[in-house]
Image (cartoon, grey):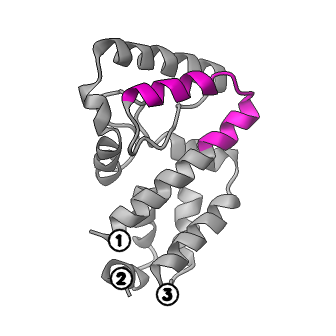
């Protein structure tokens, strides 16, 4: 068994959710993950994460989205130090982006938030700033309900990346 998972299985109930908050900022999801311990394997952890995420609703999704900085934004969102560091790694390609791309991302982020009422979220790992901008531009054409579900799917993908990072700590 993964040593991080084994240790977390025995962590007290009051602090166990914090590790999950670092992976996904939805409090209800993190509490449900912690309440489901012990978890036997990494595969079981990922399966449980998906199952519980599928039970979440708009308020949970919005809470998780709010923990992410805007794509191209410097600094922290509402998440923990660890989550903020992981966001920095995930968005590292933006550090070298041209000023014109950063300006377009800032404008697109503002339009997105005005239209949908929440932060543009995309699984940034492995994507160039130009790709993230193109995805943002395309998603601005969605209806709110479709976009909310797409953002929740992006959050799910990020959650799995972060679970793997957490297990490797």
Across the whole image, how many numbered discs are drawn on residues? 3
- At mark 3, the secondary structure is loop
Of marks 2 and 3, which one's residue comes earlier in the chain? 2
Residue at 43% in and 20% down: 105
Let me know if residue 45 appears in the view: yes
Q: Which mark is residue 145?
A: none
Magenta residues, start to end:
129-151
| Of residues 140 and 77, the one drawn nearer to the viewer in this rendering | 140
| Of residues 128 and 143, the one drawn nearer to the viewer in this rendering | 128
**Real-space CA distance between mark 2 and mark 3, rounded to the nearest whole angstrom:** 9 Å
The residue where tag 3 is placed is: 40
Q: Quadrant of the C terminus?
A: bottom left
Of marks 1 and 3, which one's residue comes earlier in the chain? 3
The question of residue 134 being in magenta is answered with: yes
Residue at 54% in and 29% down: 135
Whether tag 2 and tag 3 are in contact, CB under 8 A, the answer is: no
The residue where tag 1 is placed is: 167
Name the spot of residue 62 as percent of width and height, x first. 59, 41
Instruction: Please say if 156 is above or below 118.
Output: below
Whether tag 1 and tag 2 are in contact, CB under 8 A, the answer is: yes
Q: Quadrant of the N terminus?
A: bottom left
| Of residues 147 and 134, the one drawn nearer to the viewer in this rendering | 134
**Real-space CA distance between mark 1 and mark 3, rounded to the nearest whole angstrom:** 13 Å
Name the spot of residue 24 as percent of width and height, x first. 48, 55
What type of secondary structure mainly makes up the magenta span? helix
Name the spot of residue 76 as percent of width and height, x first. 32, 37
**Real-space CA distance between mark 1 and mark 2, rounded to the nearest whole angstrom:** 7 Å
- At mark 2, the secondary structure is loop
The residue where tag 2 is placed is: 2
Local packing at callout 1 (Cα closer than 10 Å; few below 14, some 14-19, many 20+) is some
Name the spot of residue 33 as percent of width and height, x first. 54, 71
Residue at 69% in and 43% down: 149
């Amino acid at each position: 068994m993964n040593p991080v998972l084994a240790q977390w299985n025995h962590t007290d109930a009051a602090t166990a959710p914090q590790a999950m908050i670092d992976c996904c900022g939805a409090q209800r999801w993190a509490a449900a993950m912690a309440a489901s311990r012990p978890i036997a394997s990494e595969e079981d952890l990922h399966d449980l994460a998906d199952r519980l995420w599928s039970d979440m609703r708009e308020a949970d999704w919005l809470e998780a989205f709010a923990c992410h900085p805007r794509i191209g934004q410097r600094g922290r969102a509402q998440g923990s130090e660890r989550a903020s560091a992981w966001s920095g790694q995930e968005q590292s390609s933006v550090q070298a982006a041209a000023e014109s791309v950063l300006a377009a991302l800032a404008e697109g982020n503002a339009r997105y938030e005005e239209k949908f009422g929440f932060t543009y979220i995309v699984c940034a790992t492995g994507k160039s700033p130009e790709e993230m901008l193109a995805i943002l531009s395309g998603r601005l054409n969605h209806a709110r309900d479709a976009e909310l579900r797409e953002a929740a799917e992006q959050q799910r993908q990020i959650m799995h990346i972060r679970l793997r990072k957490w297990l490797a700590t």
